[in-house]
Image (spheres, rainbow, N blue to C red):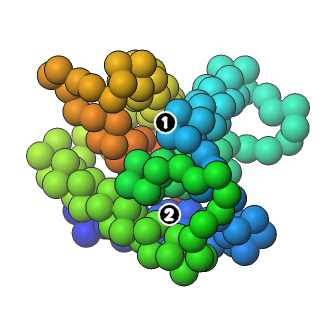
Amino acid sequence: MEHTLQQYDKVLAECTSVFVKKMKDYGPSWRIFRVGSLADQIFIKANRIRTLQEVKESRVGEDTRGEWVGIVNYSIIALIQIELGYSAQPDISGEAAAELYTKYAAEARDLMTRKNHDYGEAWRDMRIASFTDLILVKLARIRQIGDNDGQTIASEGIDANFYDIINYALFALIKLDEGV
């Protein structure tokens, strides 16, 4: 488990670095996104990954690593938006955004640690393509829950699905680092 935590922290640090750099480029412009729009942004990235996994050719010459990072970052942003609601314009400082990012990244890590214990690191035996499919399923669930006005009867809410998406994407990044 210690090795997993080290790998997890390494890929999460990569995602955090990209988030911080994009905050310097664009500021918190993402505050304008509604949660459903963020789910659609993640869908675009996951769908591109799935397409590239199937056709095995990128005509724009980019691999999927950046898409996985984007999935992590948009998912964390979605959790922030669930807490704060969307805004008509960027309305928080870069420091506040970074603090919220860190908060939700830490919560995702804590969840991963607990689930990883209970599931016995089953993710290590999974294919990266399965992570893609699981993310697409989670996005379909998020859309359905949104269509149900956020109400569920017997299921976890939207936030739980975003946490799982974060962890599946980080597992995919670990597997990419391992050359799997």
Percent from the top left, x then y, of residue 1? 22, 62
**Looking at the picture, does residue 42 appear above or below residue 143?**
below
Q: Look at 55% across and 41% down and name the residue there.
A: 34
Percent from the top left, x then y, of residue 24? 72, 74
Q: Look at 16% across and 54% down and name the residue there.
A: 114
SS under mark 2: helix
SS under mark 1: helix
Q: Nearer the viewer, residue 96 or 52?
A: 96
Check the image and name the residue furthest to the front.
88
Q: Look at 34% across and 36% down and name the residue there.
A: 158
**Rendered image quadrant of residue 152:** top left
Mark 1 sits on what residue? 128
How many numbered marks, from 0 up?
2
Percent from the top left, x then y, of residue 154? 15, 22
Percent from the top left, x then y, of residue 144? 40, 19
Does the image show residue 26? yes
Q: Nearer the viewer, residue 135 or 92?
A: 92
| Crowd rating for badge 1 (residues with CA inside 10 Å; few <14, some 14–19, many 20+) | many
Q: Look at 56% across and 63% down and name the residue there.
A: 15
The three-letter amino acid code for the residue at tag 2 is: Val
Label located before the other in sequence (1 or 2)? 2
**Looking at the picture, does residue 34 appear above or below residue 31?**
above
Mark 2 sits on what residue? 11
Relative to residue 37, is residue 25 drawn left or right? Answer: right
Does the image show residue 127? no
**Looking at the picture, does residue 155 appear above or below residue 169?**
above
Q: Nearer the viewer, residue 167 or 86?
A: 86
Measured in 3D between alpha carbons, the distance from the residue under mark 1 to the one under mark 2, in whole angstroms, is 15 Å
The three-letter amino acid code for the residue at tag 1 is: Ile
**Rendered image quadrant of residue 109:** bottom left
**Looking at the picture, does residue 52 appear above or below residue 83?**
above
